[in-house]
């Protein structure tokens, strides 16, 4: 027995429906987001929203799959973003600790293994220096009207050229200038002339 075309529709049978392809793709991409580090999760969100729009318009099946894809997509995207933020934070923290340790090492190195002391001492009425010029590693410092005694101590990693120049501010008294390296008097000079200049230089310990 043969039936005319559209027999089912003529007698009230519901037309066959089909699942929306994007809804299926959204669900699959959402599930694979577990193993793709979240890279397919964003596609799951996009495909799921597009599929929901098409389902409302075309009355096709697959709304549940589209919703599941969207939910999985957003959830996994958020979780993976949180994971990578924590990973990056840990990397930054590790780098900061490394930089700090390097900085501490550099600071301890800057403190130096050598002690350099520059001294100027007045006696017999020499109470001040008109000028004191000091240079350690060619870093020149000039001070004027300095009371005596005067002392400067530096910590250096490497020893270099050291220079001390002291001029008596008065016409009487004696000025003694010296360079002390690692507790040992390396250079010393005494000047007793009026307004005399006491000068010492040390290039090596």
Image (cartoon, helix red, strand yellow):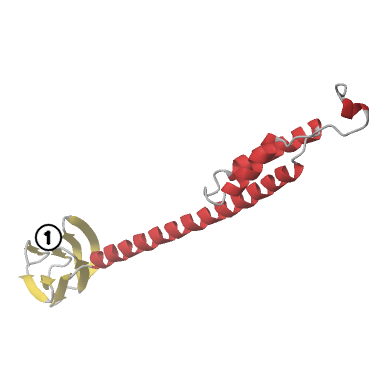
- Residue 187 visible in the snapshot: yes
Mark count: 1
- The residue depicted at 62 percent of the width and 44 percent of the height is 28
Which secondary structure lies at badge 1?
A: loop
Residue 26 sits above or below residue 6 on the image: below
- The foreground one among 159 and 194 is 159
- The residue depicted at 40 percent of the width and 61 percent of the height is 94
- Most extreme residue toward the front is 1
Q: Position of residue 204 (x, y in %)?
A: 6, 64
What residue does disc 1 label?
Answer: 160
Quarter of the picture containing the C terminus is bottom left
- The foreground one among 124 and 46 is 46
Q: Position of residue 164 (x, y in %)?
A: 13, 63
- The foreground one among 84 and 115 is 84
Can you tell which quarter of the image residue 116 is in?
bottom left
- The foreground one among 133 and 67 is 67
Q: Position of residue 8 (x, y in %)?
A: 88, 29
Q: Position of residue 196 (x, y in %)?
A: 9, 64
26 on left or right of 139: right
- Most extreme residue toward the right is 11
Can you tell which quarter of the image residue 65 is in?
top right
147 on left or right of 10: left
Quarter of the picture containing the N terminus is top right
Can you tell which quarter of the image residue 158 is in?
bottom left
83 on left or right of 11: left
Residue 112 sits above or below residue 86 on the image: below
- Residue 148 visible in the snapshot: no
Q: Residues within 10 Å of mark 1 (few under 14, many from 20)?
A: some
């Amino acid at each position: 027995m043969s039936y005319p075309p559209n027999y089912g529709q003529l007698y009230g049978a519901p037309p066959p429906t089909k699942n929306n392809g994007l809804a299926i793709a959204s669900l699959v991409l959402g599930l694979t987001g577990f193993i793709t580090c979240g890279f397919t999760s964003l596609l799951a969100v996009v495909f799921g929203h597009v599929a929901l729009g098409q389902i409302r318009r075309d009355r096709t099946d697959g709304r549940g799959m589209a919703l599941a894809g969207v939910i999985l997509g957003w959830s996994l995207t958020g979780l993976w973003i949180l994971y990578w933020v924590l990973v990056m934070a840990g990397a930054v923290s590790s780098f900061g600790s490394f930089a700090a340790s390097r900085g501490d090492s550099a600071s301890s190195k800057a403190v130096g293994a050598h002690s350099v002391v520059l001294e100027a001492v007045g006696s017999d009425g020499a109470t001040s220096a008109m000028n004191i010029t000091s240079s350690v590693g060619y870093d020149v410092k000039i001070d004027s009207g300095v009371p005596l005694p005067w002392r400067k101590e530096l910590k250096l990693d490497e020893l270099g050229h050291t220079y001390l120049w002291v001029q008596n501010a008065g016409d009487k008294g004696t000025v003694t200038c010296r360079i002390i390296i690692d507790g040992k008097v390396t250079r010393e000079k005494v000047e007793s002339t009026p307004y005399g200049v006491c000068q010492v230089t040390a290039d090596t310990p």
